[in-house]
Amino acid sequence: MQELLILAICVVAVMAVAALALPYLGPTVRIIERVSLFGSVAIILMVMAFVGSEVVMRYVFNSPIPGHLELSELLVPVIVFLALSFTQATHGHVGMDLVIDALTPEGRRRAAIVTLSASIFICAVVAWFSFKNAYQMYEYEDVTMSPPYFETWTYAMTIPIGYLLCAVRMVIQVLNLINPQRF
């Protein structure tokens, strides 16, 4: 419980710093999101080629690529979490807005501020605990169960990075909703 309280205080502090540094933070986050999205797309294409070549190697040459399944599985969170913040920035997430659509424009704005604020805290909590998990994997030198024994912590580290970047994007969105002229 104490850890969550400290995390909540850190989230509020980060929001305050973001409000002060938004002229620099916004463009920087936009660049990071685009680079991350490009990385995610490149990895998707690489995985498609990798799995296709593994099928050819297995069924045509009877020589499967060792560790193909493990590597493909490890790259899935990298693909998802590198693109998470960009998807948030473009409002690409699926949402249930039946009730929201029935509200007045001011009610929609306030509801968005409340839900984004809650989402910032949730993303911060998930980022923190997934970072702790990835760090624990690093300390244990965790690897996949079959050869070539890929280290798992590097792939797991993309989860807190993705959630942290998404939380920063949501902070920017909340500040924009609070005062659109300033932010």
Image: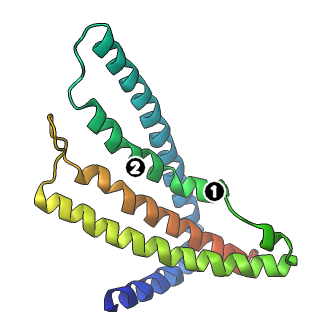
- As drawn, is 80 to the left or to the right of 145? right
Q: From the top left corner, tell me how far across and down residue 29 is, in percent.
A: 52, 60
Q: Which residue is mark 1?
A: 93
- In the figure, residue 97 lies in which quadrant? bottom right
Dot 1: element: loop
Amino acid found under the numbered disc labelled 2:
Pro
Q: Which label number is shown at residue 77? A: 2
Taking 10 as reference, is 87 left or right? right
Please report whichever mark, 1 or 2, sits nearer to the chain's N-terminal start: 2
In-image side of 156 versus 94 (left or right): left
| Residue nearest the observer in this picture, 35 or 5 | 5
Q: Residue at x 26, y 65 (%)?
A: 133
* Residue 62, percent from left and from top: 24, 11
Residue at the extreme top: 60
The answer to whether residue 182 is seen in the rendering is no
Name the secondary structure under disc 2.
helix
User: In the drawing, does residue 3 fall left or right of residue 173?
Assistant: left
**Residue at image coords 79%, 73%:** 99
